[in-house]
Image: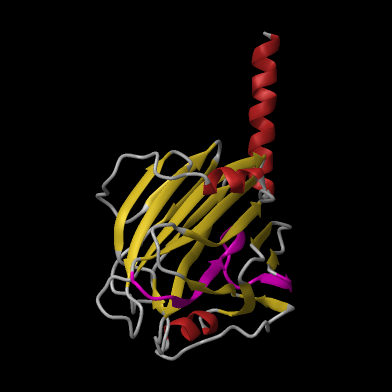
Amino acid sequence: MKRTISLLALVSIFAPGYAQNSILLTDGDATYSLNDMSGDRLSANFGTGTFFQGGVASPHQNWLWFRAGNDSREYAVSNLARLTSDRNTAEAEFTESAGGVPGGPHLKFLVQYELIETGPGRAQLTTAFLVQNLSTVSIGLSLFSYHDIDLAGTADDDSATMDPSAFSVTDPTGSTFTAQASFRNQDHQQMGGYPSLRDLLTDGSATDLDDSGSPFAPGNWTGAFQWNTTVTPGFETAFVGFTVQEISIVPEPSLLLAAGLAAASFSRRSRK
């Protein structure tokens, strides 16, 4: 939890401005990429990338959708105003509008990322969500964090269970992926097979998650968390929530064999 606190303490330690809409975070042998971070807020294709650890690539989609004011549907957080990164951390700033509120933009989202390699084949990504109300009236906000991972590089063989504010995903290799959400303001969650859950967030109607979908039989798993809060006007940026995603990869036998041969070769050279 200390890493989460240090991440939330970031204000803006990076140089201002951005010239891209993607990030690539690295720590040790772990890498995390996130692409398509700006564009048409009606698109369903935001936040695609790869979680690479243990010599294995796990494709993923991880993004935020929101409903604010009197919006009658969800929209992708998509109007990118600033994007900065430095090795294993990044911060993205978005300005968005809320339905029924005069003027605009009305909300400024800050999304902060931190990648930590926690051991051989293991890595942790903490993502914090903060929002500032730029208007003069209080705004009701529902925020959704969507997760789709093809664990260990395969899409149709993942199984999952759900606990309060948490998802646990496994695949036949013994690799695991967990997503833990902060409890504050976090009201609902849901799991389902791709693309049913993402369709709920992009189908043009208002959605509230219903805590269903567990256990999830082997298939193409997806999950989402929902936070509900009211954001008051003011200069301060309010904390909405965070997720901690952890991946642990069990290498394929061929990768283990290659690592063993390399270690044996190094040992022989050392004795010489």
- Residue in the image at 32% along x and 75% along y: 97
Q: Quadrant of residue 48?
A: bottom left
Residue 268 x/y as whole percent: 69, 17
Give left or right: position of 158 versus 105: right
Q: How many marks?
A: 0
Q: Position of residue 182 (x, y in %)?
A: 64, 62
| Quarter of the image with the C terminus in it | top right
| Residue at 63% across, 78% down | 188
151 drawn magenta: yes
| Residue 192 in view (yes/no) | yes
**Residue extent of the magenta highlight:** 135-164
Q: Is residue 126 magenta?
A: no
The image shows residue 57 at horizontal and vertical percentages of 53, 53
Q: Nearer the viewer, residue 211 or 238?
A: 238
Image height check: is 74 above or below 171? below
In the shown orientation, is residue 22 left or right of residue 27?
left
Q: In terms of image quadrants, where is residue 132?
A: bottom left
Residue 86, image x, y percentages: 41, 39
Viewed as shown, does residue 194 lie left or right of 216? Answer: left
Left or right of 102, for residue 208: right
Residue 17 vs 99, above or below: the answer is: above
Q: Is residue 57 visible?
A: no
Q: Residue at x 44, y 63 (%)?
A: 131
Q: Quadrant of residue 154?
A: bottom right
Q: Nearer the viewer, residue 120 or 124?
A: 124
Of residue 173 and residue 229, the one placed in the foreground of this image is 229
